[in-house]
Image (spheres, grey):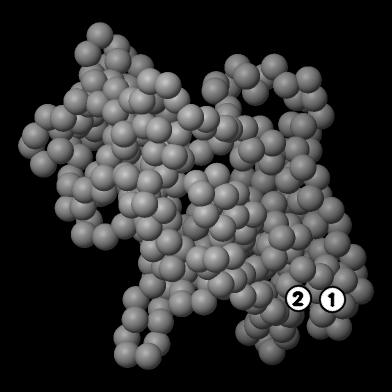
Amino acid sequence: MTGNVGNVQNPEKIAVIGAGIGGLCVAARLAKAGHNVTIFEASHRTGGKCRTEWIGRYAFDTGPSLLTLPAVYRDFFQRTGDVMGRVLDLQEVNPSFDYRFHDGKSVKFSNLSRKKTLASIENSLGADAAAEWDRIMLQSEAMWDVSREPFIESELKSPVSLLKRPRLVRDLKTISPWKSLRGLNIDNPYLSKIMDRYATYSGSDPRYAPAVLSTIAFVEEAFGAWHIKGGIGTLSEKITERCEKLGVDIQLNSYVQEISQAAGRVTGLVVNGNKQSFDRVVANADAQFVYDTLLAPTNKVVKVRKKLAKQ
């Protein structure tokens, strides 16, 4: 959730679909502001993909296993009345990555140190490869600087608001939205494989995934790779606790079947066959599922469905 959510004089009844990290965070922020918030989660637990399974003495992160941009969660806990350092024990992962190739070559990416990473690349792949990775990171840093504010730190209300940005042409040239990761034309085959990871680990094809995904490599380097003591699932547990302390009603095993509408406005939900009224609805679910399954096929919804189907 971007922007400030101040205290409200007229609390609204708000439903949040999905108790993944996004749904939990927005619910806590809204509840802190004074709204009456209910989360509906189809499964028997909160956290979505962010969970840790224990087998005996061993913990396994079943989804993401690395925390990046810890400042995002530090801000969340501060804005909802707690301190991240009190509830989470972050531990630096160093080296952050240890890449090993079929021919025996290997490269270690040092946490929070491009200098050490470049030294490892040069030692294993040569000076030209190190210089190329440095160039890639400088380009990725420029992409991050351009994309961070409009896409991450502020509310992008519509494509029109993006078009009104004063540095639009220069920013587009930097982000290169027409390029894929493979379109970055990385000469060194080992570095190309490393960059492919930023597409494949999310199930995307590097031949088609946008080049701006390379910013993840810069973010990992600049802000660090972190592990949470007890597993990544601890994050969702602590955010769930924040929701509960703020009075959010979390309804598990609650399958949302429909987002109800009337006169062009959302009026509530159908949950497990029962209609419930709400002033607003926040959908923290896959966009295609929302438009294909939960919304009635109005002209606007049909247009969005077609766009999503092409992606």
Going 56% across and 72% down the picture, which residue do you hit? 89
Task: State left or right for residue 35 relative to residue 120.
Answer: left
The quadrant holding residue 196 is: bottom right
Task: Assign the C terminus to one quadrant of the image.
Answer: top left
Place of residue 121 in the rendered image (x, y in percent of width and height, measured from the top left): 82, 76
Find numbered disc 2 in the image and state the secondary structure of the residue it sits on.
loop
Q: Which residue is mark 2?
A: 110
Place of residue 21 in the rendered image (x, y in percent of width and height, measured from the top left): 42, 52
The image's mark for residue 207 is none
Place of residue 287 in the rendered image (x, y in percent of width and height, measured from the top left): 38, 37
Identify which amino acid the numbered label 2 is placed on. Ser
The image's mark for residue 116 is 1
Comes first in the chain, label 2 or label 1: 2
* Viewer can see residue 76: no
Find numbered disc 1 in the image and state the secondary structure of the residue it sits on.
helix
Task: State left or right for residue 231 relative to residue 138.
Answer: left
Inter-mark Cα distance, 2 to 1: 6 Å
* Viewer can see residue 127: yes
Task: State left or right for residue 31 relative to residue 116.
Answer: left
Viewer-closest of 265 and 176: 265
Mark 2 nearby-residue class (10 Å; few <14, some 14–19, many ≥20): many
Going 38% across and 46% down the picture, which residue do you hit? 246
Label 2–label 1 contact, CB within 8 A: yes
